[in-house]
Image: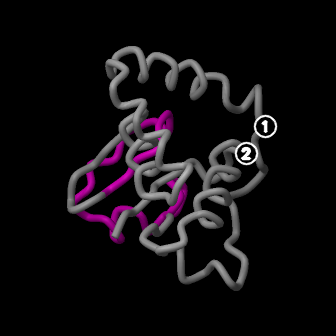
Amino acid sequence: MVTVIFDGVCSLCNSSVDFLIRHDVRRTMRFVSFQDGRLPMLLPDVILPSSIDTILVVVDGKVLDRSNAVLHLAAELPFPWKLLAAARIVPRPLRDGIYKVIAAHRYRWFGKKPSCRIPLPHERDRFL
């Protein structure tokens, strides 16, 4: 099981969660927003960053962030999306540099929602 911790007010992040839900045919991913007040209780062993500037993926107790998180999620998806995981051959500093630029501008480029995403009834079992 993979837990995805995302920025619940970020439009890009919410669109990404929608994409993952649609394409996670094995249903191995669960989702929770950084803004969920229960997060520390739901994942007590996860050390959370003080600022919401990255997606976090928790797999087998290990926390992945930035490009490593995104590429791990790609690897979990079916073909052809899993091919994106091949980007692991790009050195992490370069991958994370690109990630940081997008993350720093995500609200300006993609927008910000006034409140966190509410799961639809058919999605509720996918959220912690």
State the SS at label 1. loop
Give neighbour class at mark 2: few <14, some 14-19, many 20+ (Cα, 10 Å). some
Residue 14 image offset from top left, x and y in percent: 67, 53
Would residue 104 appear left or right of 116 to someone viewing this image? left
Between discs 2 and 1, the one toward the N terminus: 2
How many numbered marks appear?
A: 2
Magenta highlight on residue 19: no
Which residue is located at x 78 percent, y 37 percent?
111
Residue 20 image offset from top left, x and y in percent: 58, 59
Would residue 74 appear left or right of 59 to someone viewing this image? right
Q: Which residue is mark 1?
A: 111
Residue 116 image offset from top left, x and y in percent: 68, 58
Name the dominant secondary structure of the magenta segment: loop
Pointer 2 with pointer 1, Cβ within 8 A = yes
Which residue is located at x 46 percent, y 69 percent?
30
Q: Which residue is mark 2?
A: 11
At label 2, which amino acid type do we have? Ser
At label 1, which amino acid type do we have? Gly
Looking at this view, is 86 or 65 the one in front?
A: 86
Looking at this view, is 90 or 2 the one in front?
A: 90
- Asked if 87 appears above or below 80 in the picture, the reply is above
- Asked if 7 appears above or below 108 in the picture, the reply is below
Give neighbour class at mark 1: few <14, some 14-19, many 20+ (Cα, 10 Å). few
Q: Which residues are magenta?
A: 32-58
Q: CA distance from mark 2 to mark 1?
A: 5 Å
Residue 67 image offset from top left, x and y in percent: 42, 33
On the rendered image, what quadrant is the N terminus found in? Answer: bottom left
Looking at this view, is 17 or 108 the one in front?
A: 17
